[in-house]
Amino acid sequence: MPIPDPNRTNPATLPDGTEHAGTVMLSQVTDHPRFQVGEYTYASDFEPPENWATHLAPYLFENSAERLIIGKFCQIAHGVRFITASANHAQTGITCYPFPIFDPTQMADYQPDTRDTVIGHDVWIGYGALILPGARIGSGAIIGAGTVVRGEIPPYAVVTGNPGTVLKHRFPEKDIAALLSLEWWHWPHDLLQHAEQALLAGDIAALQQVSPH
């Protein structure tokens, strides 16, 4: 099986030979100064939007202080939303009402929360998951359908529920350390081709044999 072309907008070809319009390589369809996404990361939607960045992160504005950073090889299902820091209200006063946003002279400088939202590499985010401001999801994690994620999620954790809770880890601790050390998501395209079977089989020893390090 070929490794998909990261520069192809619609990387999935249906059996009839047509491209699946609802699946896109995000790096090819996002041009947003605060939205950073790695190669091979794709998103799917039953109703493909015109603006994928705004669709996925509706509160991330061009003048936002925070960034949304998504690594390589992530898989983002229909209905996923990233609620970034610009959506947050101040919570230190008597009221959370954002009076300054209604004053043009204050609006641009008013942002109580400036935390980045950071998604690692090879993260699968399931149907309808909600990623809250400042969340940090480790590489290899699986975020279950409908999960609400806040805070920090460790690498290769399986997370479900509201609030998102670590159900288990996908591999033993020593295997997770080995995978994080291999950083296969940074390998060149031709090497990934050789590594595909090991990746699909969960064969860490075989992956280590292919590793350039």
Image: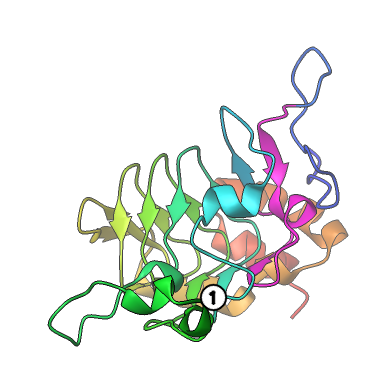
Task: Tell me if I can see residue 137 in this picture.
Answer: no
Q: Nearer the viewer, residue 65 or 7?
A: 65
> Within the magenta stretch, is there residue 27?
yes
Q: Quadrant of residue 208?
A: bottom right
Question: Which residue is rendered at x = 42% and y = 39% of the image?
Answer: 127
Task: Give the residue type at disc 1.
Answer: Leu
Question: Which residue is rendered at x = 51% and y = 84% of the image?
Answer: 105
Lateral position of residue 93 relative to residue 65, left or right: left
Residue at the far left: name it.
94
Lateral position of residue 39 relative to residue 76, left or right: right
User: Residue 48: horizontal and vertical position, in percent?
Assistant: 64, 33
User: Residue 6: horizontal and vertical position, in percent?
Assistant: 80, 52
Q: Nearer the viewer, residue 197 or 52?
A: 52
Question: Which residue is rendered at x = 59% and y = 53% of the image?
Answer: 54
Which quarter of the figure is the N terminus placed in?
A: top right
Q: Nearer the viewer, residue 23 or 35?
A: 35
Q: Considering only vertical position in the picture, is 79 above or below 163?
A: above
Q: Considering only vertical position in the picture, is 21 above or below 184?
A: above
Q: Which residue is mark 1?
A: 180
> Within the magenta stretch, is there residue 59?
no
Q: Considering only vertical position in the picture, is 15 above or below 198?
A: above
Write down the region rendered in magenta: 20-41
**Element assignment for label 1:** helix
How many callouts does the rendering have? Answer: 1
User: Residue 59: horizontal and vertical position, in percent?
Assistant: 48, 61
Lateral position of residue 119 relative to residue 142, left or right: right
